[in-house]
Image (spheres, rainbow, N blue to C red):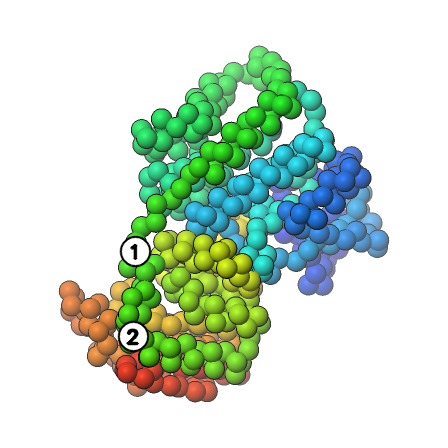
């Protein structure tokens, strides 16, 4: 039994091998006696050392003062991930990289006569260095010669299906990962994929034929299915096929308004001089507060997020525009950037609590760690005039999630606001600087405000009131 001060992680209930819990604000994982043999094989075979050296698997320390528990074999303290994100918040290339990492880990495990029993995308997270890493130490088991890969179907549904659907059909279908809690069922993916995808022999085999086989064998009693044998060489062949299929999938970048917003001479809505001044204002405000963590909401491709991340501020760079997030992530990889995590998040419809009794996967708001600071640049007018969110609600929302705020007010005289209003009635009589400052003044003290030169826009640095 757990002590009253220990809180089990709601996402750990499915695994008989052990579970994660917090105690006194620290994270631990109990390794159950059920998993003893496999855990010892992981640690003694050299697999754990190899995966950690390659930075494929998080490190952990064994804790000597284990609680008295009839189920416990060991207690370990895993490496801390500063921000937990989910597959339905990732762009195409993030999911692709995590898929390839999973296959690489499985191949490495087989070379040590072990295998992944779980191949869920929830077992991968991103470190501040920008690289994906496997976080479930208890996902390994001893390899049995002739046994098929038990996680094959899970891998195909959680990685291959969503990647194929996005690559061949429409990136918006990636949100099915939220509806189906991390996977797109094989039969559904087979229906969604166009003929051009089905002509890809590997995709046809791993998705369409796999779905038919799954349907066929689901109606056969277990006692009549018999033993299926698969040599290690054949299994490696399947892994190679999956890897080459995934590496070969490309997502054709859709040039959305926002993914290319800051390209060109005007830098979106600014003259080049004004744009450079805006970056200097933001840098000055960041240096004034220098928070440890920051959410850049409506980050676009992360141009201003990088001002923070280059200062060593761990920055969650979120935007609702999928192509912009993809561009952000590709740029991060290309430049080997640290302290920045691009995520596909619509702040007007943020990631909800999901799973068993809505506790298995945490919501973005009031679930995961809140940032010290929020940055909301060129965002407020969109939230007000496109989504009809009153300034009063915005002020209250920001006050709930951060201690300091860098926020931009774009007045009605701005060309972008005029564009928003050109096809609709202007019912926003209270959208003005005075009302903006009044509403935010209920919760924040205005530390500084600066007009961006050659524009009417104002950037504020605000501190939450006690």
Judge from the rendering whether residue 392 lies leftward or rightward of residue 58; answer left or right.
Answer: left
Callout 2–callout 1 Cβ contact below 8 Å = no
Is residue 358 or residue 34 the one in the foreground?
A: 34
Q: Badge 1: few (under 14), some or many (20 or more) residues near its Cα, within 10 Å?
A: few
Q: Nearer the viewer, residue 100 or 384?
A: 100
Q: Is residue 214 above or below residue 290?
A: above
Q: Quadrant of residue 249?
A: top left
Q: Is residue 104 left or right of residue 260?
A: right
User: Which x, y percent locates residue 99?
Assistant: 52, 41
Question: Residue 19, percent across and down?
Answer: 68, 46
Residue 436 visible here: no
Which disc, if any, is residue 270? Answer: 2
Q: Is residue 171 visible?
A: yes
Looking at the image, residue 157 sits to the left or right of residue 421; the answer is right
Describe the element under mark 2 as helix, strand or loop.
Answer: loop
Label 1 sits on residue: 256
Q: CA distance from mark 2 to mark 1?
A: 19 Å
């Amino acid at each position: 039994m757990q002590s009253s001060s220990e809180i089990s992680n709601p996402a750990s209930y499915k695994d008989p091998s052990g579970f994660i819990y917090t105690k006194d604000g620290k994270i631990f994982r109990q390794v159950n006696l059920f998993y003893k043999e496999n855990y010892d094989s992981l640690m003694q075979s050299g697999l754990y050392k190899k995966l950690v050296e390659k930075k494929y698997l998080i490190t952990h320390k064994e804790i000597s003062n284990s609680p008295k528990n009839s189920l416990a074999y060991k207690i370990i303290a895993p490496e801390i991930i500063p921000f937990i994100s989910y597959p339905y918040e990732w762009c195409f290339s993030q999911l692709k990289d995590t898929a390839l990492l999973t296959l690489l880990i499985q191949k490495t495990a087989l070379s040590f006569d072990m295998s992944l029993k779980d191949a869920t995308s929830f077992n991968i997270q991103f470190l501040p260095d920008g690289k994906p890493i496997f976080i479930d130490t208890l996902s390994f088991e001893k390899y049995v010669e002739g046994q098929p890969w038990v996680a094959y179907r899970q891998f195909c549904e959680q990685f291959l299906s969503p990647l194929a659907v996005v690559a061949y059909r429409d990136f918006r279908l990636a949100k099915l990962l939220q509806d189906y809690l991390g996977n797109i069922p094989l039969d559904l993916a087979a229906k969604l994929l166009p003929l051009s995808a089905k002509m890809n022999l590997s995709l046809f085999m791993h998705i369409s034929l796999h779905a038919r086989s799954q349907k066929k064998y689901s109606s056969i009693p277990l006692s009549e299915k018999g033993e299926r044998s698969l040599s290690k060489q054949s299994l490696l062949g399947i892994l190679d096929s999956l890897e080459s299929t995934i590496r070969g999938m490309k997502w054709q970048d859709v040039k959305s308004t926002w993914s290319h917003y800051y390209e060109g001479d005007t830098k979106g809505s600014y003259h080049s001089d004004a744009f450079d001044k805006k970056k200097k204002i933001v840098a000055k405000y960041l240096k004034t507060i220098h928070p440890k963590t920051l959410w850049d909401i409506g980050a676009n491709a992360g141009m201003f997020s990088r001002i923070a991340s280059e200062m060593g501020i761990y920055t969650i760079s979120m935007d609702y525009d999928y192509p912009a997030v993809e561009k952000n992530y590709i740029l991060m990889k290309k430049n080997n950037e640290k302290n920045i995590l691009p995520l596909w998040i619509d702040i007007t419809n943020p990631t909800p609590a999901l799973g068993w009794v809505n506790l298995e996967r945490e919501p973005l708001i009031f679930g995961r760690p809140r940032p010290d600071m929020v940055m909301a640049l060129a965002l407020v007018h969109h939230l007000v005039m496109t989504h009809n969110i009153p300034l009063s609600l915005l002020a209250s929302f920001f006050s709930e999630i951060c201690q300091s705020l860098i926020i931009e007010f774009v007045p009605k005289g701005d060309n972008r606001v005029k564009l928003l209003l050109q096809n609709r009635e202007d019912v926003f009589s209270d959208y003005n600087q005075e009302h903006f400052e009044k509403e935010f003044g209920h919760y924040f003290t205005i530390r500084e405000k600066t007009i961006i030169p050659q524009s009417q826009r104002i950037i504020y640095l605000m501190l939450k009131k006690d």
